[in-house]
Image (spheres, rainbow, N blue to C red):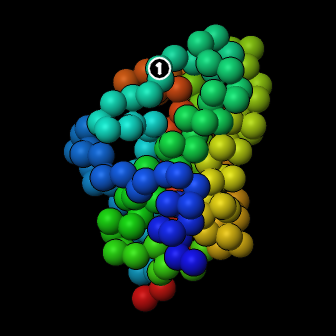
Amino acid sequence: MTPEQKIADLGLTLPEVAAPAGAYVPAVRTGNLVYTSGQVPFVDGKLLRTGKLGADLTTEEGAEQARVCALNALAALKAEVGDLQKVVRIVKVVVFVASDPSFTEQPKVGNGASELLAEVLGEPGRHARSAVGVAVLPLDAPVEVELIAEVAS
């Protein structure tokens, strides 16, 4: 089963890549690595939620937002390489979590992204990860996800 079929089996659709909000591109390939720009939880060009974890969103809501971000990152990755079957491995994922100062469950929020990548890609979707609390993200997004993937030539 292809990654795209697994996405469909999960009841999801790989979205169109969001247009950059600044002077950057959604993904860059260098050799066998693809770096995605940070992806926020856009659906149909709009943020699903805004605010901070621990004040405006629960950990579970944040994990769902991270899942959407990861799906958007997969869309950017596919746009760069043409086919998600070319993914050899997701090497690294960074999850930025807009957090209330008392919020400490950034890793649990990050699990939303990590679990989606493993569901879609299997073992190649398992990766190293950082989940970092930040004061604010662009557009008041609650979560932003970027990834580095190794791809076949």
The residue at 69%/53% (across/down) is 115
Q: Please report the residue visible at 71 percent of the width from the left and 45 percent of the height from the top.
A: 111
**Number of disc labels:** 1
Q: Where is residue 68 in the image (x, y as percent from the top left)?
A: 51, 43
68 versus 84 height, above or below: above
Q: Is 108 placed left or right of 21 in the picture?
A: right
Up/down of 27 relative to 21, above or below: below
Q: Is residue 16 visible?
A: yes
Residue under the point 47% across and 68% down: 4
- x, y percent for residue 9: 56, 61
Q: Choose between 72 and 20: the one closer to the eye.
A: 72
Callout 1: 10 Å neighbours few (<14), some, many (20+)? Answer: some
For this orientation, the residue located farthest to the bottom is: 153
Q: Given the image, on which type of amino acid does mark 1 rest?
A: Thr
Asked if residue 92 can be seen in this view, the reply is no
Q: Residue furthest top?
A: 55
Residue 97: give x, y in percent of width and height: 60, 31
Q: Nearer the viewer, residue 151 or 67?
A: 67
Left or right relative to 64: residue 36? left
Disc 1 element = loop
Q: In this view, does 138 lie to the left or right of 99?
A: left
| The quadrant where residue 41 appears | top left
Q: Which residue is drawn at 66% across and 61% down?
A: 119
Point out the image quarter for the N terminus: bottom right
Q: Where is residue 56 in the image (x, y as percent from the top left)?
A: 59, 13
Residue for badge 1 = 50
Q: Is residue 153 above or below residue 103?
A: below
Q: Is residue 112 above or below residue 84?
A: above
Tell me the quadrant of the picture where the C terminus can be found: bottom left
